[in-house]
Amino acid sequence: MKNIALILASGTGERSGLNQPKQFFKVNGKTLLEHSINAFETHSLINEIIIVANPDFIEETKKISGTHTVISGGKTRQESSYNGVFAINSNNAVTNILIHDAVRAFITQDIITACIEGLKTHKAVCTATETPDTILEVDNSGKIITVPERKTLRIAQTPQCFKLDVIKKAHILAKEQNISVTDDCGLILTNNLTDIYVVQGSSSNKKITYPEDLKFAQWLFENN
């Protein structure tokens, strides 16, 4: 069984307020991308790491990534995931792929372990946490349609993890059907390829998106 971490680092960081992609923002002397890479390369069960980079920052990403494979991403997250998934040559071996956002730099060893354990019995797992807040469903005018029960809701994180053959099939079908989704679990659900099970995430496994998130990142590293 081979476990491959696919780190998506091809974003532009437009919402972060920075003059460079947010994966290059430094916390404690290291970029967010470096922190994410380190989490996987220090885990005993990870066999390989592939980084999908912003095409305009390939060389910078290679410098950060060391000996790990770096490939070019696409215009969307879905395209970048596709490029990464199909860069893997499994040689017909059973392969697990853990797809992770580079800017979730606080991923823990426990989360990685839980994902790999989940793939021993399932073909797809998603890291997620309970929501502490009530979630509202609204229409285009802003009117509340319904208030779902909080106990049935989860906040999706990454890694989102799959048997390689399953996520490859999902991408192929999405291309054939011209389907666009926001994450890899959406690819699986669209064609009902397999059940997806949740593994426990962490409130610190936060996606760094906005300027206030960068301050949170700095604070978290300084206080842990």
Image: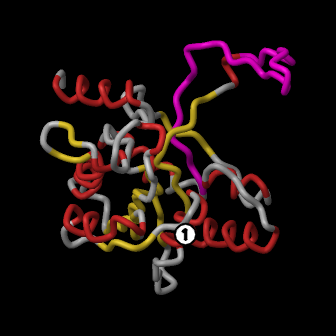
Q: Position of residue 132 (x, y in %)?
A: 55, 14
Q: Is residue 209 above or below residue 91?
A: above
Q: Is residue 204 above or below residue 172?
A: above
The residue drawn where x is 59% and y is 13% is: 133
Q: Quadrant of the C terminus?
A: top left
Look at the image and say whether residue 48 sits in the magenta stretch. Answer: no
Q: Position of residue 192 (x, y in %)?
A: 78, 56
Pick the front one: 71 or 158: 71
Lateral position of residue 52 relative to residue 214, left or right: right
| Element carrying mark 1 | helix
The residue drawn where x is 40% and y is 58% is: 7
- Which residue is the extreme one toward the left? 29
Q: Is residue 46 above or below residue 214?
A: below
Pick the front one: 98 or 218: 218
Q: Is residue 54 above or below residue 30?
A: below
Magenta range: 124-149
Mark 1 sits on what residue? 164
Q: Position of residue 198 (x, y in %)?
A: 57, 39
Q: Quadrant of the N terminus?
A: bottom left
The residue drawn where x is 56% and y is 57% is: 77
- Which residue is the extreme one toward the front? 19
Look at the image and say whether residue 129 sits in the magenta stretch. Answer: yes
Lateral position of residue 201 relative to residue 49, left or right: right
Crowd tier of the residue under label 1, counting other residues whose Cα lies within 10 Å: few below 14, some 14–19, many 20 or above: many
The residue drawn where x is 72% and y is 57% is: 180
Give, as a three-letter code, the residue at label 1: Leu
**Visual colour scheme:** secondary structure
Q: Position of residue 146 (x, y in %)?
A: 84, 17
Lateral position of residue 198 relative to residue 188, left or right: left
Count the marks: how many? 1
Residue 41 in which image quadrant: bottom left
Lateral position of residue 130 relative to residue 62, left or right: right
